[in-house]
Image: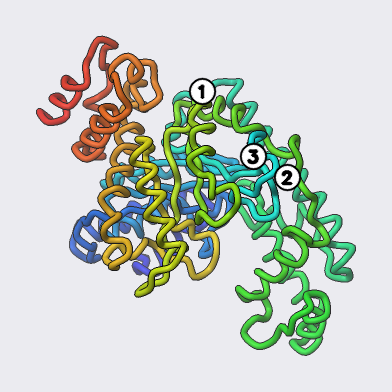
Amino acid sequence: MELSVNKLEQQLDSFDLSQRKDALCQLWSKAQAGEIELVPSRDWVNLHCHTFFSYNAYGYSPSKFAWLAKKAGLAVAGIVDFDVLDGLNEFYWAGKQIDLKTIVGMESRVYVPEFADKVINSPGEPGVSYHMGVGFTGADITDAAGEFRAGLVSTSEQRNRALVAKVNGYLSPVELDYDRDVIPLTPAGNATERHICLAYARKAAEVFDNCEKLSRFWTDKLGKEISGTDLPEGVILQGLIRAKTMKHGGIGYVQPGAGSFPALEEMNKFILAAGAIPAHTWLDGISDGEKEIERLLKIEMQSGVAAINIIPDRNYTSGGKDEKLTNLYRIVEIAEKLDLVIVSGTEMNSPGQKFVDSFDSAELEPLLPAFLRGAYIIYGHCVLQRQAGFGYTSRWSKKSFDSVKKKNEFFAKAGKLIKPGTEKILSGLGEDVNPAGILKRINDD
């Protein structure tokens, strides 16, 4: 029996990889036959979408995000998950199947000793910074880098289990069994605080058999009236659970110190060993640490940072000009001055976040060329790293360019010209090939 488009799109979020792949192939066949309308390709990008391998507010798998990105006509699409690269192979496979330029990143947190007395981008946590690697290809993760990555996951799970033990005591009789109630919410066992919030909301609905009792329980525990559409697992409820029990000042919160997260230099060493590009993640320029953003970036660049991640949508109010919008323009200007590659996206790990930024808005349209250029640079890196080991941070790049500006120009051109279905034309390149020779090979294809 042939499934409808709606059913196939739902199947893209199955925890069964074979079902996801089958659904994507069927959807692409329908699109090729003209049965599904795709938005014509446009210069919009989203390089920072979390998938269900960490937490996506809508349950999107890598294949689902790839498909929706293709339907929306995105020029380049990228996934980013916390502490894992579990979606890497699937997302690159999906991109090839549907002729979509794709990139893969990983997000975590690091400790920056030089900013130990300043909050950077993790509220209430001086010295701690969200941090990314972008342009992972999977081909260059050594045993040592693999061990480091496994350590990130293990440490995260230990933190989660300790947090649940504390929160259980506060929310009793609503208590979670981590293995039974939390782990099944994600396909590969990499649970986050957001999964735990959802698990508590669902557990409470099991414990209290009517809305009145459930409302009374949460109102008492969270100190704010919870009723109506917030129950049993609404956005506001889950946000309050997280704020009250897990974030700074919450019953389960443990203030991190120098040993709670890997040092910046250690994380960047892992990212570079894996053939990817270290990236600072910028929030909004409001914190004490981000008010010294140029000093912070120059410190981070010494250990390998070559890119900066920006979430545009949370930094402006449509139709108005405020401090955050001013800071957004300033950080783009600083990034370009320092020749940092700009990575932009919407995250999608909280309900209400857009699928793609409103690049036709008066606020974002002037910034789109910088965001698009960054997307092409990262995609060009991914293809060259995967096919020849000649990515942005490779030995070949170090010897082939006498400035970062020239390197950025080359990878932007390559990323714009390369087509997903013809990436293999760059395999087997010799170490003596020069950038012009690579561009010629792409153009001649």
Left or right of 283 in this view: 398:
left
| Three-letter code, disc 1 | Ala
Of the numbered discs in the image, which one, if any, rests on residue 115? 3
Residue at 17% across, 27% down = 439
Counting the numbered discs, the total is 3
Q: Give the residue number, with chain letter if any, for mark 2.
A: 157
Nearest to the observer: residue 404 or residue 414: 404
Query: Which of marks 3 and 1 precedes in the sequence?
Result: 3
**Residue that sits furthest to the left in the current view:** 444
Q: What kind of element bears circle 3?
A: helix
Left or right of 196 in this view: 335:
left
Q: Give the residue number, with chain letter if any, for mark 1.
A: 273
Of the numbered discs in the image, which one, if any, rests on residue 256? none
Query: Which of marks 2 and 1 precedes in the sequence?
Result: 2
Q: Residues within 10 Å of mark 2 (few under 14, many from 20)?
A: some
Residue at 25% across, 50% down = 369
Could you say which quadrant of the image residue 253 lies in?
A: bottom right
| Three-letter code, disc 3 | Phe
The answer to whether residue 394 is above or below residue 149 is above
In the image, residue 269 lies at what x, y percent? 56, 25
Q: What kind of element bears circle 1?
A: helix
Nearest to the observer: residue 154 or residue 287: 287
Q: What kind of element bears circle 2?
A: helix
In the image, residue 328 lies at what x, y percent? 41, 56
Gap in Å between the C-alphas at discs 1 and 3? 25 Å
Could you say which quadrant of the image residue 238 lies in?
A: bottom right
Gap in Å between the C-alphas at discs 1 and 2? 24 Å
Q: Residues within 10 Å of mark 3 (few under 14, many from 20)?
A: some
| Three-letter code, disc 2 | Glu
Left or right of 188 in this view: 170:
right
